[in-house]
Structures are given as structure tokens and as C-alpha cells.
Image (tube, helix red, strand yellow):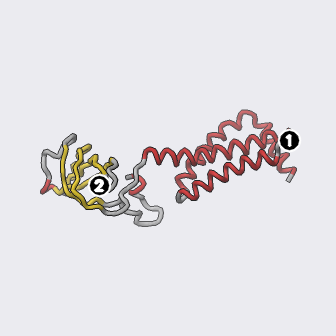
Amino acid sequence: MSSLGDGAEEFLASAGFDRGPWLAVAFAGGVAAWFVLPGPAAWVATIAAGAVAALGALAAWRGREDRARLTLAIVAVGLLVAAGVATGWARSAMVGTEAFARPVSAHLEGRVLERIEQPADERVRLVLAIRDPDTGAPAKVRINVPLAEDDPAYREGALIAFTARLMPPAAPMLPGGYDFARSA
């Protein structure tokens, strides 16, 4: 095991400034892990593993000059992978909004943000800014209006009132298929 540590230390010593770009790769790997891992439990485990690797390297080789570069590399990579996962998680929490958990039927009021003509489907899709009927939180929804019920007043900026059944995005049809909930 000592020869492995010696070899890693020699490699890191000879790499010089070529080690720097690998820090960006470690951070990007953490962000990629956030996308690949199934949920919060796995994200926390990955963040904890990065922190444990960093603390383990510090504890195992504390004060050893012959392992200074290896210690620094393990600490940096562990912390950057953890930071990448945490960044992905935090950014999604700040930007994303939760989809409706269940179908909701309600009388709603909303402002038309976008009008999308879909004549092939015999409908108009309206993107609306509304308030969630359960929580009152702002939400962005898409509703489909059949062409027979379309009104020229449904244009961008218009305030409309309607009764609708709002559905959560459909789950992927096949494992690994397109996930509407992720892009909603």
C-alpha cells in the first residue's frame, strides 16, 4: 500500500499545474452525480462520502510531508465532488417548482404569458401564471383550449378566469424515457 501512495505522490509531483483542470472535472462530476442519482438520500450520501474522504485523508496523513500532495488532491477532489452535488441540489431548489402532486379541479384566475397555436392538434395552448389553489404559491401552468372554445381575447397579457382540471406531468413511459416532470 505504501508503494501505491508513493507512486501517487510521485505522479502528482510530476504533474505540476496539469492537476488544476482535474478540479473542474471533480466539480462537474459532482453535478453529474446529482443528475444521475435517484434522490435526496443518495445526494446526502455522496456529499457525506466526499467529506469523509477529505477528512480521512487529513486524519491519515496529518503532518506527513511525504503525502502532502496526495492529501491535498484527495481533500480537494472530495470537497469539490460534494460541492458539485450540493450546487446541483441548491440550484434546482431555487429555480425549480414542484409539480402538482395530484390532479386539482378548481376555478382559477391567471395571466396569459404565452399563446401557442397548435392547429394540427385542433387546440391552442396557453401558458398561464396562476396561484396554486392549495397553497397560494405562484405557479406556471399550461392549459389546452379546443379551437371551438378559443377566444381572441386569450392573448399574451390577458387576465382570464376559468375552471380547469390541472394534472401533474406524466411519468416516463419507459425506464430511461423522457421525463416530463423534470422539464416542467
Give the residue drawn at x 72%, y 43%: 75
Q: Nearer the N terminus, badge 1 or badge 2?
A: 1
Local SS, label 1: loop
Give the residue drawn at x 73%, y 42%: 73
Question: Which residue occupies the extreme top position in the image?
Answer: 17
Asked whether disc 1 touches disc 2, contact meaning CB atoms under 8 Å apart, the reply is: no
User: Which disc number belongs to residue 133?
Assistant: 2
Identified by mark 1, the residue type is Arg
Q: Is residue 116 left or right of residue 57?
A: left
User: Which disc number belongs to residue 64?
Assistant: 1
User: Which disc number belongs to residue 81?
Assistant: none
Residue 150: x and y in percent read: 14, 52
Local SS, label 2: loop
- Residues 52 and 7: in front is 52
Question: Which residue occupies the extreme bottom position in the image?
Answer: 174
Q: Callout 2: few (<14), some (14-19), or many (20+) C-alpha neighbours within 10 Å?
A: some
